[in-house]
Amino acid sequence: MGTYTQIFYHLVFGTKHKEEAINETNEKELYKYIWEILKNKKM
């Protein structure tokens, strides 16, 4: 008999006093970078 396990991660990043630290141009690059890391780890 097999078992099935599934884990979901919800990551939230924030700055002190909710200051805007990443502009729109850098935001897209950051998301690409994070996505590649997750794909390489097969997440």
Image (cartoon, rainbow, N blue to C red):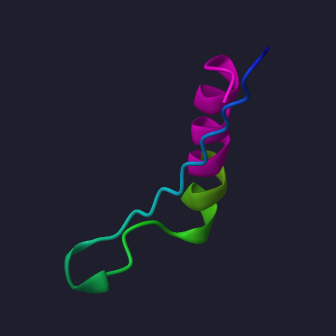
Q: Nearer the viewer, residue 37 or 2?
A: 2
| Residue at (62% x, 62% y) in the render | 25
Q: Horizontal and vertical percent for residue 18?
A: 31, 83
Q: Horizontal and vertical percent for residue 43?
A: 66, 30
Q: Horizontal and vertical percent for residue 6?
A: 67, 38
Q: Nearer the viewer, residue 27 or 15?
A: 15
Q: Nearer the viewer, residue 1 or 23?
A: 1
Against 9, residue 36 (above or below) is above
Q: Horizontal and vertical percent for residue 8?
A: 61, 48
Left of 35 or right of it: where is 22?
Answer: left
| Residue at (60% x, 41% y) in the render | 7
Q: Residue furthest left?
A: 16
Against 41, residue 32 (above or below) is below
Left of 27 or right of it: where is 5?
Answer: right
Q: Residue furthest right?
A: 1
Q: Determine the main secondary structure of the stretch shown in magenta.
A: helix
Against 27, residue 1 (above or below) is above
- Locate residue 42: give its quadrant: top right
| Residue at (60% x, 69% y) in the render | 24
Span highlighted in magenta in the image: 30-43
Where is the N terminus found, in terms of image quarters?
Answer: top right
Q: Residue furthest front?
A: 1
- Locate residue 16: give its quadrant: bottom left
Magenta stretch holds residue 32: yes
Against 17, residue 15 (above or below) is above
